[in-house]
Image (spheres, rainbow, N blue to C red):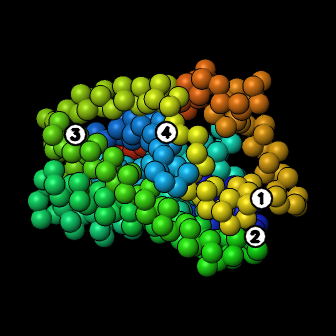
Amino acid sequence: MHMADALVSPAVGGIMLAASAGAIAYSAYKCKDDLDEKKIPLMGVMGAVIFAGQMINFTIPGTGSSGHIGGGILLAALLGPFPAFLTLTAVLLIQALFFADGGLLALGANIWNMGFYACLLVYPFVFKPIVKRGLTPSRITVAAIVSVVLALSLGAFSVVLETLASGITELPFMTFVGLMIPIHLAIGLVEGIVTGGILVFVYKMRPELLESSVENTKLPKNISIKKVMGTLLIFAVVVGGGLSLFASANPDGLEWAMENVAGTAELEADGDIYSSAGSIQESTAFLPDYGFKSTDGDGSAAGTSVSGIVGAGITLILAGGTGYLIYAIKRKKEKAS
C-alpha cells in the first residue's frame, strides 16, 4: 500500500506530511515517559523484521493480486503503540529514501495510512480490549486478525480519499473504493493470521512482552528478552536474505486496483515538486526497487538478497537508535532536574 508521488497532489502530500509529523512528535513525547528501556533493542530488531517481512508479497488466490504485511499491529503488540509508530516510520523512511519504495511527497500519507491507524488507533481501541480479559493464544489470534483487517481497511480507504482530494480523475471514487476495500480485506486476513502466529510464538517464549504492552507497564528487571530478540533477528535475516526471493510477482493490492480502474499501476504527474522529489529519491536510492542500479531493478536474486539484509540492518540501527536517543534525552533531563 505504498503510494507513489503521482497519487497525491502537493497540497494533500503536505497536509499528510504535517499530520504524520505531528503524530511522530507526539509519539516521541509519549515515549519519554512510557518507553521501556529494556525494549529499546527490540525496536531495532522488530524494525528489521518488518522491513524483511514487507519484502515478501503473498499471492491472493483467484485475483491475480498479492499483498505484504503492514506490521503495525505486530509492532504495537510487542513494543507498545508509540514506540511501534516510530519504528514503522523508520521502516517507511528507509524504504522511500534508499529503495525508492513509496514516494517522498507521499511519505506522510504512507506513514499515516500504514502506521497511524494500526499503532495509534486500532491497537489501543480494538486489540487491547479483546485481549485484556485474558491473554491466551486464541484471544491473541482473534485480536490480531480483527485488528489487522480493520487497520488495513482504514488505510486502504484513506488511500482512496487522498487520491480523491488530490483530484486524480483516473481513479474515480466509487470504482476505486469498490476494488481497494475487498482486496485489502483479503490481504488483511492473511496478514492477521501471520501476525497472530508470530505473537502466539513470542507469547509462549516470553509472555511478559505482550503483557507489558497491554498493561502499559515496564518489563521486570529480572526478565531477559535476549533469546526472543535473537530468534527474531535470525528470522529477519532468513526472510530478507532468502525467503524474499520467492515473493509473488503479482501486483500488490493498490497496484492491482489501479490497473483494474485506470489500466496502469503507474500514473504520471508533472510539476517542479514532483521532479524535485524524484531527483532526490534517485540520488539517495542505492538499491532502487530492491535491486542493483546496474541491473536497472530487474529483481536479480543477488540484488534482492542484499536489499533484504542491508535494509533490515539499516532499519535496525535507525529504529533502535531512535529509541536510545529518546531514552538519552530523558535521562539527561532527569539528571538536570
Identify residue for label 2: 170
Q: Identify the secondary structure beneath mark 3.
A: helix
Identify which residue, 108 or 321, lies in the foreground.
108
Is 68 above or below relative to 139? Answer: above
- Does label 2 or label 4 sit earlier along the sequence? 4
| Residue 183 in view of the camera | yes
Q: Do the CB atoms of the residues marked 1 and 2 lie less than 8 Å apart? A: yes
Q: Could you tell me the amino acid type at mark 3?
A: Phe
- Identify the disc placed on residue 201: 3
* Residue 301 locus on image (x, y percent): 60, 23
> Which residue is located at x 35 percent, y 38 percent?
42
On residue 267, which mark appears? Answer: 1
Q: Decide: few, some or many residues near mark 2? Use Cα within 10 Å; few <14, some 14-19, many ≥20.
A: some
Q: Nearer the viewer, mark 4 or mark 3?
A: 4
Rendered image: mark on residue 74: none
Cα gap from disc 1 to disc 4, whole angstroms: 24 Å
* Amino acid type for the residue under numbered disc 1: Leu
- Visible in this render: residue 335? no
Rounded to the nearest angstrom, the CA distance separating label 3 from label 2 is 44 Å
